[in-house]
Amino acid sequence: MGRVWRAADEMLDRQVAVKEMRIDGLDAEDTRTRRERTLREARATARIDHPNVVRVYDVVDEGERLWIVMELVVGRSLERVMVEEGPLGPRETARIGLGLVAALRQVHAGGVLHRDIKPGNVLVESGGRRVVLTDFGIAAIQDAKALTMVGMLVGSPDYMAPERISGRPQGSPSDVWSLGATLCAALGGRSPFSRDTTLATLHAVLYEEPELPSAAGPLRPILAALLEKEPTVRPHLTEIEAALHPIAHPAP
């Protein structure tokens, strides 16, 4: 959804992240859609003020490019952590899950669905223990006009809830599904629905039961619940938090 640069805010003397979004498309309709999606990302994120959600400071419009000025989170994406250090254990995975639950509680309370939760959109701060949800490029704000074109899926299929793929109504349980797939990837190195082709991945999401990571251990029951095909039976954020907390913070 764009390139991200490290930059200096000379007016306020601080380091920031600047996301460069090219919006020149093949035709006027494509350009309009890209512009609206970029502005939607900025608006969606700016509505939320929470330590587990990346902060947006400004948007700069330069015609063919839009720039989103954001908080600089010094750290790595969960995807990069997995590549460089290998899969995580249940305790660290549960800790990251708690950070994402806190983020989603604020996101959903603000009338926003993220719709693209995956390891690449989760930042793990260096030194500190903060987990930050970022990249709201395809977020859906309640009462906002849909921008996804007919016949086109926007997002990562192996982290996409089955109701999104099948065109059924979406809601907070859709983000809960993506959270489950992300935590499985943290434990096993990839989404439990990843296949060799996009069509095979979509089939797996819609019809196949997830192969939970062998390292899931005490996380196995909650992960299975998060990845239920039927949205209405997936646990609520409060239940997820209650299941993750004793694993992330075991009693001495």
Image (cartoon, helix red, strand yellow):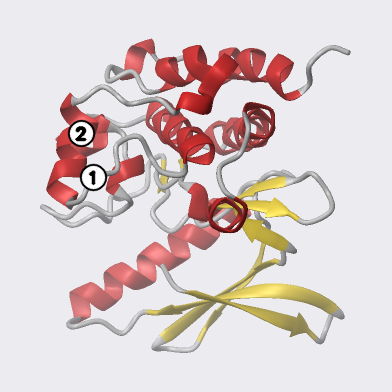
Label pair 1/2, CB-CB below 8 angstroms: yes
In percent of width and height, residue 6 lies at: 67, 79
Left or right? Give the position of 209 relative to 51.
left
Left or right? Give the position of 53 relative to 249.
left
Left or right? Give the position of 156 relative to 243.
left
Above or below, 26 against 160 in this view is below
Left or right? Give the position of 212 relative to 166.
right
Check disc 1 and give the amino acid type.
Answer: Arg
Rendered residue at 48%/12% (across/down): 221
Instruction: Place residue 229 in its image quadrant.
Output: top left
Rendered residue at 18%/57% (across/down): 149
In percent of width and height, residue 35 lies at: 37, 72
Above or below, 216 against 5 in this view is above
In percent of width and height, residue 103 lies at: 63, 38
Instruction: Place residue 54 in its image quadrant.
Output: bottom right
N-terminal of the pair, mark 1 or mark 2, is 1
The image's mark for residue 195 is 1
Rendered residue at 29%/37% (across/down): 193
- The residue lying toward the viewer, choosing from 189 and 41, is 189
Check disc 2 and give the amino acid type.
Answer: Ala
The image's mark for residue 55 is none
Q: Does dot 2 land on a helix, a strand or a loop? A: helix
Q: How crowded is mark 2: few (under 14 residues within 10 Å), some or many (20 or more)?
A: some
Q: Mark 1, mark 2: which one is toward the viewer?
A: 1
Instruction: Place residue 64 in its image quadrant.
Output: bottom left
Q: Is residue 146 visible?
A: yes
Residue identified by numbered label 2 = 204
Q: Can residue 49 be seen in this view?
A: no
Distance between mark 1 and mark 2 Cα atoms: 8 Å
Rendered residue at 35%/34% (across/down): 192
- The residue lying toward the viewer, choosing from 140 and 227, is 227
